[in-house]
Amino acid sequence: MGTTQLETVPEPKYWHLKTVIGEALDSDFSVGEILPNERDLAARFGVARATLRQALEQLELEGRLQRRRGVGTTVAPPRMGVDVSTTEHAWPGAGQDAWQSVDCTNVVPPQAVARLLDTDAGEETHTVRRLRVSHGQSVAAELLYVPVSSVPELSAIDAPSGPARARGVLRELQRLDLEGQDRAVELGSARADHAKELDRLPGAPVLVVTTRYFSEGRTAAVSVATYRADTCRLTFGDSGDLEISEHEQEQERRAS
Amino acid sequence: MGTTQLETVPEPKYWHLKTVIGEALDSDFSVGEILPNERDLAARFGVARATLRQALEQLELEGRLQRRRGVGTTVAPPRMGVDVSTTEHAWPGAGQDAWQSVDCTNVVPPQAVARLLDTDAGEETHTVRRLRVSHGQSVAAELLYVPVSSVPELSAIDAPSGPARARGVLRELQRLDLEGQDRAVELGSARADHAKELDRLPGAPVLVVTTRYFSEGRTAAVSVATYRADTCRLTFGDSGDLEISEHEQEQERRAS
DNA sequence: GAGTGGTCTAGACCACACG
DNA sequence: GTGTGGTCTAGACCACTCA
């Protein structure tokens, strides 16, 4: 008998699963709702748990699911838009910029940062830790590296560390002339400390935003901010109300 | 006997593996070099292949490794900086913007895009497919949605589809007054068609850049561009020469 | 055909949250 | 304690590339 079957392109099971579950999320579930546990789901779809998990991981990566150990899997709300536009020519910590200072220590920055700052290898910098909270949720953790030479006036009498010193460093920074800044975004995975601050497991996908602040013809500070990739959409310009989230089903596409 | 062991925080094996291999990459390997295959590596570290793969996946996500089925695992070059700054107030396709048009069809856009364009559900738009090539490599695939109403002058006599029509749509777009644009970046996973264009497997992590183009008080076009997250660092402003890549080795630096 | 990475299975145990 | 997701194992087979 003639096999009318055309080009069997064996779609991986987990990929198909992801599609099926994704469609189910759109039609049968609402935000915050709890899914059946992984063992039940795997049995229901007749696959191994590992295979099911591969599908769930993808959906979580796309911000459609939220999984928490010991609790369960829930339907995630749409990603929140987080403004990271660079147009406002202002130092970090100026005005109300949604960041709260956590700490400040003197450390030797990673080599990559040292190169951006053009400091000597092994030279210490002020390092301000900040946390960005949005809609009651921690969305980003930042390390702001400020060479000692950038804030020469900073009194050593100030608190030697802690939030008070962080504010001191930021205050001194404001006194400088900000000549410009630039920014880069790339994918990374959360270090253990950031993961904890962001309520995620180590290795969770994050969007790393690196910003250079220029003053007096040199790089006066470098900020490395890691945003939760699952819950955040970084916006530039006034696209805060942008409501696309890239996944979302469109079965009808094929119909036409 | 007193257990001097402090707080055994059992670090996952794959996490530790990732660290060890990452350090080995810095010290013992150079860009392009081929790693031993997964079965050998797993045996060498005394773990199951699945565990080893979890570590390699992380390293690939961070852009440090490149894996190709049937070939092997190689050390990836540093991520390339790709300029996506929005400051140049220009329509897509203006001047030399590193994009090459591939195709153009009339399709009904996904719901999310239709909402951005404020078109009726089910309304067709011109849809230009473009590819961005950088350093001899495809780094991004774009879908540019242009409502028919945005380019009323477009001759129906032109090629009804294909690259020629794509150029026609872009040409008509240039005639409009571009009043502004905004941009958002988020993490996604590559659809099957994009994955193929970018020489990746479906589901590969991508950075999705959504751009809205405004003209005459409305959204005249929407672009959804997906960049390879493993090989690209998106830059805004003049940070094209930014050389941070979060991992990177430079043993020679220490010598000086 | 040989060798690679990609998918999948059917188990096991662990860490964590919650009642 | 119970139930959840997270980690890990030791296999198997498949899809792909290349000599």
Image (spheres, coloured by chain):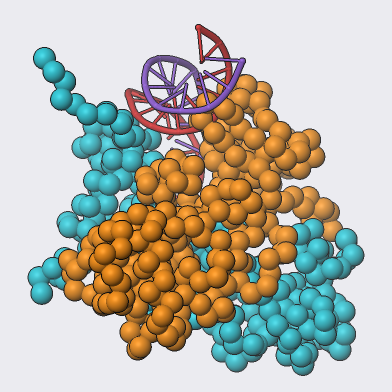
Chain colours: A orange, B cyan, C purple, D red
**Does the image show residue A91?**
yes
**From what the image shows, is residue B104 above or below residue B228?**
below
Identify the image quadrant of the C terminus of chain A: bottom right
Identify the image quadrant of the N terminus of chain A: top right
**A58, B32: nearer the viewer:** A58
Q: Residue at x 80, y 39 (%)?
A: A27
**Residue A65 rendering spot, x and y as whole percentages:** 62, 41
Q: Residue at x 76, y 42 (%)?
A: A26
**From what the image shows, is residue A157 above or below residue B11?**
below
**Residue A136 rendering spot, x and y as whole percentages:** 61, 48
In the image, C13: left or right of B103?
A: left
In the image, B204: left or right of B193?
A: left
Q: Residue at x 54, y 33 (%)?
A: A68
**From what the image shows, is residue A32 above or below residue A242?**
above
**B124, A88: nearer the viewer:** A88
**C4, B77: nearer the viewer:** B77
Residue B239, picture quadrant: bottom left
In the image, B229: left or right of A80?
A: left
What residue occupies the far front of the structure in this picture?
A: A157
In the image, B138: left or right of A13?
A: left
**Does the image show residue A112?**
no
